[in-house]
Image: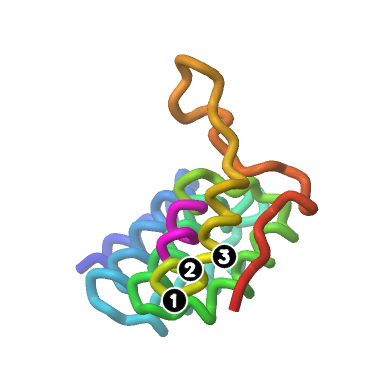
Amino acid sequence: MVDKIFQNLLHDRAINGSHWSSLIYAHGCINKDLDRAMKIFESIATHPMSSERGLPDAVAYEAIIHVFVTHKRSDLIAEYLERLLLSNIHMTAYIANQLIKGYAAAGRIDYARHTFESMLDPPEGIAAPNNHLPHSPDEVPPPGD
C-alpha cells in the first residue's frame, strides 16, 4: 500500500526528502528489508526533481543511516557518511545521534565519542536551528567501518 501511495507522490512536484525518508524507514526499519531500503535511497537520484530539490538531502541520509543502525550494519555507514560529506550536506544532530548509536552498538566507542564531542551547542534559547556538526571537513568525525 505504501508503495502505491508513493508512486502517486512521485508524479507530484512537491515530493521532498521527508517523503523519501518515510519510504526508506518503512521498508528498512518496519519491514526489516535492508536491500529494499538501500535501493530506494539509490533511486532518489533518478527522480527528475532530485537535482532541482537537492535530493538526497539530510533527511534521506538520516533515514538510511537509521536503517543501517537498526540492522546492526555499521559497516555500511562509512560509505554513506562520505557521500553525505562530499555532497556538502550539513550533518544534522539527528544524523549525529544515529551515528553515535550505531558506532556504540558496534563497539566503536572512540568514533561515538568523537561524534558526540564534535557536536556544537545551539545558541541559547534556540533548540534546532544551527544544531549541526561543524561544517569544515577537518572537524567531522571519521567515517568508521
Residue at x-position 66% and y-position 50%: 89
Tell which of 128 and 57 is nearer to you.
128
Of callouts 2 and 3, the N-terminal one: 2
Q: Residue 73's image quarter? A: bottom left
Image: magenta residue range: 96-101
Taking the spot 57% from the left edge, 58% from the top edge, the residue there is 56
Q: Nearer the viewer, residue 88 or 104?
A: 104
Q: Looking at the picture, how far across and down is residue 96, in whole percent?
A: 51, 52
Q: How many labels does the image show?
A: 3
Measured Cα–Cα span from mark 2 to mark 3:
8 Å
Q: Mark 1 points at which residue?
A: 106
Disc 3 is placed on an element classified as helix
Asked if the residue at tag 1 contacts the one at tag 2, i.e. Cβ–Cβ closer than 8 Å, the answer is yes
What is the three-letter code of the residue carrying label 1? Answer: Ala
Q: Which of 139 and 49 is in front in this view?
A: 139
**Label 3 crowd bin: few (<14), some (14–19), many (20+), radius 10 Å:** some
Measuring from the top left, give residue 35's x and y in whole percent: 41, 84
Q: Which mark is residue 110?
A: 3
- CA separation, marks 2 and 1? 5 Å
**Residue of label 2:** 103
Tag on residue 95?
none
Front: mark 2 or 3: 3
